[in-house]
Image: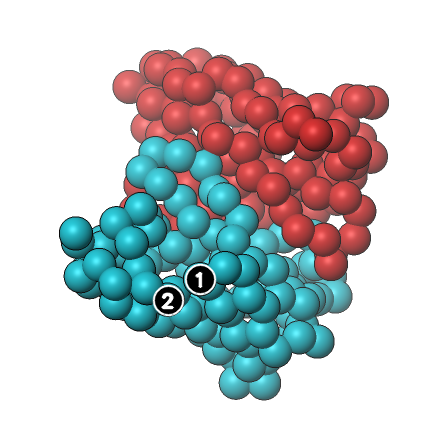
Chain colours: A red, B cyan
Amino acid sequence: ETGVTQSPTHLIKTRGQQVTLRCSSQSGHNTVSWYQQALGQGPQFIFQYYREEENGRGNFPPRFSGLQFPNYSSELNVNALELDDSALYLCASSLDSAYNEQFFGPGTRLTVL
Amino acid sequence: KQEVTQIPAALSVPEGENLVLNCSFTDSAIYNLQWFRQDPGKGLTSLLLIQSSQREQTSGRLNASLDKSSGRSTLYIAASQPGDSATYLCAVRGSGGSNYKLTFGKGTLLTVNP
């Protein structure tokens, strides 16, 4: 069984640029959630995708968008990067219902200069 | 709006000590509560998941309890080891319309000294 993987590991961008982060869910999981973790803080929910549809969204502006593919892998896109977007971006996968455990990937460290 | 608080923010103990980490949440309408471990700059490792109908879960030296009515959970670590040093995060999954997301506390930074 393959765990959750994310790419790239680290990324450096400048303000105003766009970035795409990728996540492969754990085998058999159909739900992917994205979280942003600023330094010294707990992760904050960005959005969730279930069977290729956005299933819920946190308090993030529209320049944060996502996609889920038929194989349940997912992308997080951020446009017009701001300095405050610098954070660890975590992807989590799970199977269906709210009762099931979420499994997290290693994260992508994004630095915006 | 669900808020999760973890106390203490940091804890330093000598090796071999038993310890308790605390988590409180403001809305008792939850599906489950999950404890995670995070090493510096790394992702989250799930330690224990407690469903709302359960009172506790155990895994090795770890025991987590849940008192939903009072909005509290504790993570008990027995016979602590230097390898237990990490940040421990508590997260709750809301019920009803917010059951798609986890709400996290800021974590407790644990240091176990040899």
Q: Give the x, y percent position of residue B88.
A: 39, 55
Q: Which residue is mark 2?
A: B78
The residue closer to the viewer here, B8 or B12, is B12
At x 46%, y 46%, the residue is: A43
Q: Is residue A8 above or below residue B29?
A: above
Question: Which one is earlier in the sequence, the residue at label 1 or at label 2?
Answer: 1
At x 34%, y 34%, the residue is: B41
Asked if badges 1 and 2 are on one and the same chain, I answer yes
Q: Give the x, y percent position of residue A111.
A: 34, 23
Q: Amino acid at mark 1?
A: Arg
At x 67%, y 67%, the residue is: B51
Q: Is residue B7 above or below residue B98?
A: below
The residue lying furthest to the bottom in this view is B69
Element type at marker 1? loop
- Which chain is mark 2 on? B
Element type at marker 2? loop
- Of the numbered discs in the image, which one, if any, rests on residue A34? none
| Mark 2 neighbour density, 10 Å: few (under 14) some (14–19) many (20 or more) | some
Q: Amino acid at mark 2?
A: Ala
Q: Which residue is mark 1?
A: B61
> Circles 1 and 2: CB distance less than 8 Å?
yes
CA gap, disc 1 and disc 2: 5 Å
Horizontal side of A27 relative to B93 (left or right) equals right
